[in-house]
Amino acid sequence: MKVLLGVIVCTMVLLLSLRSCAAAMRPDLTITTIKQDPYTMSKGSQMEGYCMDLLSELAKKLDFKYNVHLVKDGSYGRQDESGAWNGMIGEVVRKEADLAIAPLTLTAAREKAVGMTKPFMQTGISILLRKDISEEAGIFDFLTPFSVETWVGILAAYLGTAISICVVARLSPCEWSQPQTEENSFTFSHSLWYTAGALTLQGAGPHPKALSGRIICCTWWLFGLVLLACYFSNLSTSQGSDSNQLMVKGFEDLANQQGIEYGTLSGSSTLAFFKNSNNPTYRRIYEHMERAKSFVSSMDEGVRRAKEGNFAFIGESVSLDLVAARHCELVRVHEVIGMRGYSIAGTLGSPMLKNLSVAILELSEAGELAYLRSKWWASSCMADPAKASPLQPHSLKGMFLVLALGLGLGVLLAVLELTTKSRSNAGEQRKSYCTVLSDELSQRLRTTTTNKKRSQETADKDKA
């Protein structure tokens, strides 16, 4: 028994010794970074931010220890005329640091000097400007709440209703009892006027007296009420969405306008992109900035000028997203050009870079990078209302169906009223029902010319 206990104790001591040796053998890496919100920020004596969280996750996966310090000259890394590098890239080249973790853009020049991992974040070039710099309203913007198809459907419904009222007013004996002597007040022109007045909630008399005509009018009133409610709701939504009415929606718009000044960070990779581009639009943008000397010396200056208005700041989309999240009066346009990535830099030929690239890909596939992005780019701004899309006919198909049923029911009742009266007159006059009905229809569906002649004769008699 004592021998067994001795073996167990020796085994435990051996395991603890091996664990201590493994911990001692873990690499202790020197990491250089730069202070930039939200990648690396000071919190007392510690540092926090997106890059610090990413570094922590990588250390867990690859089992290494690290010490982080801020770059001495506060620079990312640029090559001078003699070929020497400054900033974080320079520290890695001179082996003063094993790794540089920061929003370092992966470029060909840097790839030649140091090793770069797979990108941990994708970015590009975009435009930042105030939300209230919007385009002037178009002449026909009041038509935007409805699509063209919906407007055509409304016009067809309007004409159909006016025709139905006109026909019903002629067929119904309750509306036009004496077609031989009376003039029908519901001519086609008056029916059009009456229907338009009802649609605008103004009303236009006289109103139908027959049940068939009133059913059609009530159905049209209901259709018009719902239609106006949908129209004004969509109109207020579309007019209230400033961010969807920006005068500058992309770099083509920026190059073609003269009212808004624009610029970018002096000496930045963004400026180099426009300077070296063969795209005519990008060249015009660079030439304008060079001619106007609209460069800014820092990111903060670009943001300040954008907040003051009448200035568009061109920068990296990820950084502009953060600014827009912190300053609710600013917005980044949707267009992003010159896509590139942020990578971790290490000494050239270091075997550590391969493992870091694999670990970055694993974190991306697991959703950890997306979580870190949402954590550090969280916005306190209220979401702008989405711009309402034009209302399509299928959105109002229920009301079109109700209107069609109402028109059909009204016309059917008018026909029933006429047939009932014709049957009654046929019995009184001892004539054929078909003959009486035919006479009634011929009298009621006469052209308006006959009515005008009768009106003229009546007027002449009154004068005599």
Image: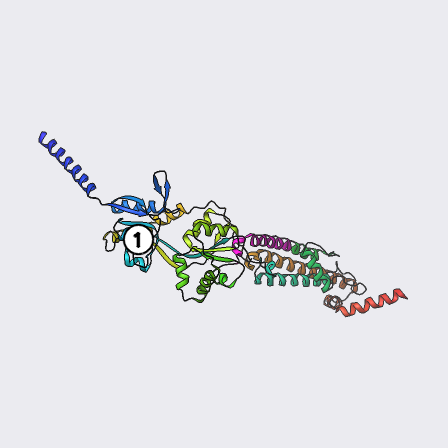
Q: What residue span does the magenta drawing correspond to? A: 222-249
**Where does the image place residue 390, in percent across and percent down from the top left?**
55, 58
Is residue 225 one of those drawn in magenta?
Answer: yes
Q: Residues within 10 Å of mark 1 (few under 14, many from 20)?
A: many
Magenta-drawn stretch, dominant element (helix, strand or loop): helix
Count of numbered labels shown in the rendering: 1
Residue type (three-letter) at the residue carrying disc 1? Ile
Is residue 224 one of those drawn in magenta?
Answer: yes
Give the left or right position of residue 314, taking residue 464 as reference.
left
Give the left or right position of residue 331, taking residue 142 as reference.
left
Give the left or right position of residue 335, taking residue 47 as reference.
right
> Dividing the image into 4 quarters, which one contains the C terminus?
bottom right
Q: Colour scheme used in the picture? A: rainbow
Q: Residue furthest left?
A: 3
Q: Is residue 66 above or below residue 459?
A: above
> Which quadrant holds residue 423?
bottom right
Give the left or right position of residue 291, taking residue 419 as reference.
left
Element at badge 1? helix
> Which quadrant holds residue 126?
bottom left
Q: Nearer the viewer, residue 198 or 373?
A: 373
The residue that label 1 is drawn on is: 89
**Where does the image place residue 46, in percent across and percent down from the top left?**
34, 40
**Where does the image place residue 110, in percent across and percent down from the top left?**
31, 57
Q: Residue furthest front?
A: 82
Residue 6 in view in this figure? yes
> Dividing the image into 4 quarters, which one contains the N terminus?
top left
Residue 1 in view in this figure? no
**Where does the image place residue 350, in percent across and percent down from the top left?**
23, 53
